[in-house]
Structure formats: structure tokens, C-alpha cells
Image (cartoon, rainbow, N blue to C red):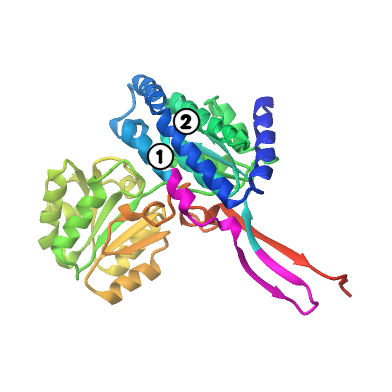
């Protein structure tokens, strides 16, 4: 095991023990100080980011958009920290308490997870969002970003660490691994003595690699093969607006819609209008046989298309025979992230929500709302697509666990 990585893990454990004991007011002051430091050093951050962008000549535009940091994005990061400071501290509450038949006083309390490891790709905002959420919830964080953003991430981490030191708090609550090699990432995935939980953030390839190879417990996040299903009772204008916005607003993010399913009873009427609106925004359409009969300019969809997260202006289209067919298709092909039904039927909307096996299921609203900030969490550590122990956008509460504190007066069990 890499000695430097072990040292990082040991320092993180020490910092986590210290941060877990901080009161809410202290943590909030530190978050404010970190936010102020980002704004004070924004030119340093942007300069580092420009150096990263200059090296990212082979990156597709959809990924350089995620990598890019400007003055507004620095402001957004800082505001995110201030928002987290205003949120309720989950570790400050006792969930419930009772006295059992033996006279023991039992308290159920929310406590930090400990040391959280995050492996992510070219999204510098993750450095700040993860720091804010882990610190407020009483954890320490070890960050390992991609090589594409190493200069930006290093600048951000150094600024955040310096702000903590000025507050007399442990800088090692935030640590960035500057070695971006796959070998070190693999060792991090096996750092079971020091990391309590690992959260991958990035494309499906990264996430699956971590899930399959890590020995540290993993929360699976991110991959979004999201669907919009237009039911036979849908309104055309609403269906068009939701589909277009869900696809084109930010096609590179995990909550963008990737698939369009449409009920056969309205396909002939609705699909030409919706398809044209998508084509007008530069979306490449790939359809099944029935969809291509209605809109011949679509390319033919392959079997692989139904399982692909494009992160681009590409959308696959399928005509389905019924609500049941739509639900079956989605549950089989989705990544269990976010799905939408557009319908005027309360009953069919409710059936869709009950039967779809995804973290976020919408009736008549865009998949793009699946976001920790939108949900009121301030920011998010990621969007979990699994069922244990967190699901959907992960905020402060999802970075804690339960601890039972039991007080007696000399009881022994007979």
C-alpha cells in the first residue's frame, strides 16, 4: 500500500474525530470563511482552470463545459457553501428516545459517517460541494479528481484548507490526492482501514469500475439513462416543452433525458411536432421501426442505444403499446436515476410513480429537477441510484448514520 496514501488516511481519521465534535456555530463560521476565501482568490482559481483547459484539447466540448470555471461559477461555489451553512445540522438532533422495560434510557442520534472518499472526473465544483457537505455533517473528506482538472482542484483544495487553518480548525478535514494515476485510485478503493465510504462521481465507466473493484463500501451515483414517457392522455404542448427542456438544457449532465417513449395512440399526432422541436435544437434522433415510419429522418436505433447514456445532443425514441410496456422498458433499461410520465390522468401518473424502480419519478415535470440544490439540500454529494443506504440526491442527512446512546443505573441482563 502506498505510504503517502496511508498517511493521508491517518490524517483524515484524526481530522474526522475532531470535526465530529464541533458545534454547529463553529462549522457555520468555517463554511463562511471558506466561501469568502474562494471569492478573494477567484483569480488564482480561474488562472489554474485556464491552464487545465489549455491542456484539454482532446476533450469533447460537453466535458470542457463541466471543467470550465469562471467568475460566476466561483460565485456559485461560494454561495453553495453559504447555503449549506444555513441548513439544519443533522448531527445536532436526537431523532428519538425512549426507556425500555429494563429502565434503560435509549437515545437514537445522527452521527457522521467518518472519512468519506470521493473519486470524480472533470468537475471542479465537486471539490467545493463535497467539502461543504462533508464538513457541515461532521466528516472528513479525501478527494481524488481527474487529471484534466488537477490544477483547478489543487488551487481550490489549498484555498479551502488555508481557510480552515485560519479558523483554528483541522485543514486535514479536506485533502486532495494529487497523484491522478489509475494505480493510486485503485489503492484508494481498497483503503478500508481509513475510508468509511467511497462515492464515485462521473461517467458510467468510472462508477462501474469503482463499484466492481472497491473493497471500501461504495454508494453508487450518477449514471443517468433517464426517460420521458408521453402517455396517451398527455397534452401536446406540455409533452413538447418537457421533452425539449429535459434534453437540450444541459445535455452533458446526468439528469438530462436520454430516451423518449411515446404511446402509440398519440405517436402519429405528437411525434412529428416533438421531433421537429428537438431537431431544431440540433438533437440527433435514433428511432425504433415504428418511430421511423412516423419521422423518417431519424437514424435507426440499435439495441445498445436503449442502454446508453449519451451526455450529448442525442436521443433515442421508441413507440410503445401501453403504459405497462413503457414501465417494463424503463425498469429494464434505465440506470434508476430519474424518469418522467407526461399525462393528464391522475391514476396513470400515480401508477407510473408506484411501479417505476428509480430514485426520482416525476409526473409532468422535467428530469432536470433531480438536483440537491433544487430539492432544498443546498448542494449534493451525488445522486445515488442504489437503495442502500441513500437514494436520490444526497445532502447532509445522507452523510450521517445512526448511533444509539444507552444510559443505565447498574442494570445487568439476566
* SS for callout 1: helix
Residue receiving disc 1: 77
Percent coordinates x, y for residue 215 in the rendering: 63, 42
> Against 142, is 308 above or below?
below
Tell me whether circle 2 and circle 1 mark residues in contact (CB < 8 Å).
yes
Q: Is residue 121 visible?
A: no
Could you tell me which residue is drawn at 13 percent across and 50 percent down?
277
Residue 7 is left or right of residue 178, and the answer is right
Q: Which mark is residue 249?
A: none
> Going from the N terminus, do you reach mark 2 or mark 1 first?
1
User: Residue visible at 34% across and 33% down?
Assistant: 63
Q: Is residue 96 magenta?
A: yes
Residue at image coords 22%, 51%: 245
Front-lying residue, 317 or 279: 279
Magenta residues, start to end: 81-108
Q: Which residue is mark 2?
A: 156
Amino acid at each position: 500500500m502506498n505510504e503517502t496514501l496511508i498517511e493521508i488516511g491517518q490524517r483524515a481519521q484524526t481530522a474526522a474525530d475532531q470535526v465530529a465534535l464541533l458545534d454547529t456555530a463553529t462549522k457555520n463560521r468555517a463554511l463562511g470563511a471558506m466561501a469568502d476565501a474562494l471569492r478573494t482568490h477567484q483569480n488564482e482559481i480561474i488562472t489554474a482552470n485556464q491552464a487545465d483547459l489549455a491542456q484539454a484539447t482532446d476533450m469533447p466540448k460537453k466535458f470542457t463545459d463541466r471543467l470550465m470555471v469562471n467568475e460566476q461559477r466561483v460565485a456559485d461555489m461560494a454561495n453553495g457553501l453559504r447555503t449549506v451553512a444555513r441548513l439544519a445540522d443533522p448531527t445536532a438532533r436526537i431523532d428519538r428516545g425512549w426507556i425500555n422495560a429494563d429502565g434503560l434510557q435509549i437515545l437514537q442520534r445522527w452521527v457522521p459517517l467518518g472519512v468519506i472518499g470521493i473519486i470524480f472526473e472533470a468537475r471542479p465544483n465537486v471539490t467545493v460541494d463535497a467539502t461543504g457537505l462533508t464538513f457541515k455533517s461532521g466528516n472528513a473528506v479525501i478527494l481524488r479528481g481527474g487529471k484534466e482538472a488537477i490544477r483547478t482542484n489543487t488551487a481550490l483544495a489549498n484555498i479551502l484548507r488555508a481557510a480552515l487553518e485560519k479558523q483554528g480548525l483541522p485543514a486535514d478535514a479536506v485533502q486532495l490526492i494529487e497523484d491522478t494515476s489509475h494505480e493510486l485510485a485503485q489503492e484508494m478503493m481498497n483503503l478500508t482501514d481509513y475510508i468509511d465510504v467511497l462515492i464515485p462521481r462521473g461517467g458510467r465507466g468510472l462508477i462501474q469500475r469503482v463499484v466492481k473493484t472497491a473493497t471500501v463500501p461504495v454508494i453508487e451515483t450518477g449514471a443517468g439513462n433517464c426517460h420521458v414517457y408521453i402517455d396517451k392522455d398527455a397534452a401536446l404542448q406540455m409533452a413538447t416543452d418537457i421533452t425539449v427542456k429535459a434534453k437540450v438544457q444541459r445535455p452533458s449532465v446526468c439528469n438530462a433525458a436520454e430516451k423518449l417513449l411515446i404511446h402509440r395512440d398519440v405517436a402519429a399526432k405528437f411525434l412529428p411536432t416533438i421531433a421537429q422541436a428537438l431537431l431544431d435544437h440540433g438533437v440527433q434522433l435514433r428511432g425504433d421501426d415504428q418511430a421511423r415510419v412516423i419521422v423518417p429522418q431519424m437514424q435507426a436505433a440499435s439495441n445498445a442505444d436503449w442502454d446508453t447514456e449519451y451526455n450529448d445532443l442525442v436521443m433515442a425514441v421508441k413507440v410503445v403499446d401501453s403504459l405497462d410496456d413503457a414501465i417494463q422498458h424503463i425498469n429494464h433499461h434505465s440506470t434508476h436515476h430519474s424518469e418522467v410520465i407526461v399525462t393528464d390522468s391522475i391514476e396513470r401518473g400515480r401508477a407510473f410513480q408506484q411501479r417505476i424502480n428509480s430514485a426520482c419519478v416525476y409526473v409532468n415535470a422535467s428530469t432536470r429537477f433531480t438536483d440537491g440544490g433544487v430539492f432544498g439540500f443546498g448542494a449534493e454529494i451525488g445522486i445515488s441510484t442504489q437503495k442502500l443506504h441513500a437514494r436520490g440526491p444526497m445532502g447532509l442527512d445522507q452523510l450521517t448514520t445512526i448511533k444509539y446512546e444507552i444510559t443505565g443505573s447498574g442494570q445487568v441482563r439476566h
